[in-house]
Structures are given as structure tokens and as C-alpha cells.
Amino acid sequence: MAAPWEDVLRNEAAIQEAASVAVDAALLEGVLMRTEREPNASDVVNYAPFTLLPSVVPSALFEQAYAVQQDFNLLVDAISQNKEFLEHTLASTIKVDDFTARLFRIHMQVLEEGLAQSVFLGINRSDYMFDCGVDGMPALKQIEINTIAASFGGLTSRTAAVHGRVLKVLGKSEEASRLLPNNPSKGLALGIAKAWELYGSQSAVVMFLVEEVQRNIFDQRCVENELWNRNIRVIRKRFRDVFEKGSLDDAKRLYMDGQEVAVVYYREGYVPKNYDQQNWEARLLLERSRAVKCPDIATQLAGTKKVQQELSRPGTLERLLPGRTEAIARIRATFAGLYSLDMGEEGDKIAATAIADPDRFVLKPQREGGGNNLYGEELRQVLEKIRDSPERTSYILMDKIKPQPAMNYLLRAHSPLQVSECISELGIFGVYVRQDKEMVMNKAAGHLLRTKAIEHADGGVAAGVAVLDSPYLV
Ligand code: ADP
Ligand code: MG
């Protein structure tokens, strides 16, 4: 599918000019990141990496991704409430993966004590690629669903304006006018605001739980601003602060420094390196509290790759979403092939297949944040080493999705301007709020398109591989 601006791609002078306009537009619009050198100061900031041009996305697949988002919200929420399913699904994983095991232990402890939380807020992002099947027709295939700290809803709310400007500079005003409005930060904030309201204490605050290193602070500030605009007070704290200053009262209300917290929005806590012993204690304190956690620990577990793999087994969706035949069909249509490496015949067989033909697969550990998956020769070597050991159960196997590349320029501070062969990943943000058993909000809140050069098998924007993009529907 050719973009309507192919003619200018090789016009060096026009591209140079457009790139300098693009960078200034990004800075003006607030597509910003702190620098690697000073990740915790805003004295010097730079633009977040982005594509010079939007990328072509088939409109039918784009609509399909939006149409299935509410179904995924329901599914994630159902999994989070299904103790038996999580227990059974993660049983083999937690024997060999310490991080998942620790999360799971907190989950069980909180359930045993009895949940103090009655309002639940989910913010997720379901990511897809457009797989070129044998017939050449692109199909929407889910990469994963992120149920904790799904990022870039803020910055991506500002990229369409930048791409609009670039297209105009290149003489493509008509195309510029067709770029879609997109504002996930508002949708995410509406979910947080609803949860805050249902929590029911005017003086309570929303706490963003943030990492020690905060390069991506502007993305979070976009959501934060939307809350301040609604007169909701926001504080930013780290696990360390919670450990030192967090407490629960008799009714398990959470206080930080004497201030009641209604909602804890995690932008932290999704990888092992986020935790030391104190941080684990802080996490437990938060989970035991009555505050609305986004996500609660069960919802975080619902987003593990092991759960994703189990969902693809025949009959699992039917058990989790009884009676919802149409939703199940929409969800299942987005699944790529997923395979368990649990010990036994099924696992032995797929391990042997992957070792013989590694380019067909991706080997995934239970990790988030990009850069953890194994491909090709490396996949073969690792799998060969662990094929007879229970260690293999800490991974899943997935069919490799093969999208059609397109040419674009990736703009990164201090990098030369050069054309690259690229592939894109579309994310749809989902937001839902449940009070006890009743869903009071269930929405798709906007999209994120990320694009990377094909030589990188893995890695997101934060990992320095992918860049922000805007879809151009055809
Ligand atoms: P993470 O939790 O680290 O983000 P993902 O499952 O999203 O893990 O994988 C990271 C990246 O690896 C994706 O953004 C995508 O570029 C690539 N990737 C993951 N799964 C596949 C797949 N099945 N086929 C092709 N590329 C994949
Ligand atoms: Mg991912």
C-alpha cells in the first residue's frame, strides 16, 4: 500500500526542510522527553523520537482494533476476578520465575485478608501488528496487552498536529486534513477521575507512582494536567516514598504524609529492577489498601504473557466470558499462534519445531518493557539449552508476525536523517471502571502508532528502538 507522498520521499531538499519544521513543531506541541544525561531534570529537554511522516494503516484493521477494545477490557477484568484461572495458569510459571511468583504471593495474601478495594480502574493498551498472510492480505494480530503502566497516551495525543504540519509543508494539505484526532490522555484521565469520584472523598488525591528515572515525565504530565483541569489533586511519588511515608488506617484507607489517596496510578512496578525489599513492602501496603489501584495486582497478572498464551487454548475464552459469543469471536480473530512450553509432550513438540525453524517464532519470557524477547539463531540456542529443563516454562512461544515494511525517516535527537525500511505497531488504549460487580465505564480511549526500522526485532520507544507515529488510514 503506497503512501500518497511517495513522490517526495527521495527529494532530499524537501525532506531536510520538512524535518527541521517537524522537530520545531514537536517541541512546540510538547512531544518531549528528558535527556539520557539528565533523566530527572527538565532544564534541558528534547523531542521524543518520532517519524517524519505518518504511516499507512488499513482502515478496516484500524476499525477492527477499536471495535475489539471493549471486549478486551471485559476479558482482562474477568481474568483479574478469577482466582482459580490465575492460579492454574501461572502454576508452572511461578515455580521458575521469581518475579511473577512474588506478584502472585501478594495477590494471594490480599485475597486471604479480604479485598478492601471496591472500585476498580483498568487502563490497558492492546498492541497489534499487521501480518501479511500467505494471501498477501494484511490481518490484525495482537502482540500483547499491557495492563500496567501502558505509556505514550500523553505524547501521542500531540503527534497528529506535528504530522499535519509536515504534510502541509510537503504540499499535501488534503492528506493533512485526513489525519485523525486522537487524545488518549483525556480518556485515561476520565477513567481516573471516575474512579476518584466513586472512591468518594473530595479531599483525597490521585497518586502517580513513578520510577526513580523519569525521562518520560511529559507523557505522564499530559494525563496529570487533565486531572488538575478537573480540580483533582495529583501527587507524584516513588515506592521509596511509600515505604517511608505511606500508612493505612483501621479502614485500610491509604495515607501519604497524612494525605488520603483515592487512586494509585502505577507508572512503575512492572519489571524486577523496579523492586528491592523495601519496594516490595511498599507494593504490599498499596495492594492491601482501600485505594483504587490502577492496576490492582490481579490485573497486572492478567497481563502476563503466560496468561496470553493460555487464552488462545480452545475453550478458555468461553469459560472466562460465558455467553459472550460475539465478543469471543472478535477477540479470537486477533490471536496469533501461541504455544505453551510447559513440561510434557505438547511442550516437547513445539520446542523441537521452534529449534528446527526458529524464524517462524518469537520466544518470550514473562517480562515487559521491550528488549526481552528472543528471535532467530538466539532463540534456537537458548531453547536448545533449556529444552529439557523446567526453566523453559518461564517462556512462551509465539508465531512471528511479518508485516509489510514501508519507507520512512525516523527523527531522533543527534542522529543523521536517513530513510529506513520500517514496520509499525498499533496500540489501542482501553479504560474501564468497575464498582463491586457493576461496570460503570468501558471505553476505547485512543490509539498509539509506534514505528521502528526492520533491523530491530524488538524494543519500544522507551528502549530507544521505536518512535512515535500517526496512522494515515487508507
Ligand atoms: P514487551 O512486554 O517487552 O513490550 P512484547 O510482546 O510487546 O513485549 O514484544 C516486544 C516487541 O517485540 C514488540 O513491540 C514487537 O516489536 C516485537 N514482537 C513481539 N511479539 C512479536 C511477534 N509475535 N512477531 C513479531 N514481532 C514481535
Ligand atoms: Mg510490548
Image (tube, rainbow, N blue to C red):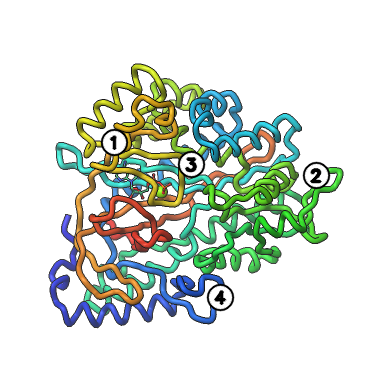
Q: Earlier in the sequence, mark 3 or mark 2?
A: 3
Answer above or below: position of 67 versus 421: above
Question: Disc 4 designates what residue?
Answer: 41
Left or right of 178: which side holds 427?
A: right
Left or right of 218: which side holds 415?
A: left
The residue nearer to you, when weighing 378 against 241, is: 378
Quadrant in which the C terminus appears: bottom left
Q: Which mark is residue 220?
A: none
Label 2, label 1: how far apart the Cα atoms are: 45 Å
Left or right of 261: which side holds 187?
A: left
Amino acid tagged 2: Lys
Q: Secondary structure at mark 3?
A: helix
Q: Which mark is residue 70?
A: 3
Q: Residue at x 54, y 47 (%)?
A: 272
Left or right of 88: which side holds 249?
A: right
Label 3, label 2: how far apart the Cα atoms are: 31 Å
Please state the horizontal and vertical placement of residue 423, each as a whole percent of the image.
26, 54
Please state the horizontal and vertical placement of residue 281, each as a whole percent of the image.
70, 46
**Which of labels 1 and 4 is toward the front?**
4
Amino acid tagged 3: Gln
Residue 328 seen in render: no
Assess mark 1: CB under 8 A from ligand 1? yes
Q: Quadrant of residue 26?
A: bottom left
Please state the horizontal and vertical placement of residue 366, each as a whole percent of the image.
46, 39
Amino acid tagged 1: Asp
Q: Secondary structure at mark 4?
A: loop
Question: Disc 1 designates what residue?
Answer: 399
Is there a contact, CB below 8 Å, between mark 1 and mark 3? no
Question: Disc 2 designates what residue?
Answer: 252
Label 4, label 2: how far apart the Cα atoms are: 35 Å
Is there a contact, CB below 8 Å, between mark 3 and mark 2? no
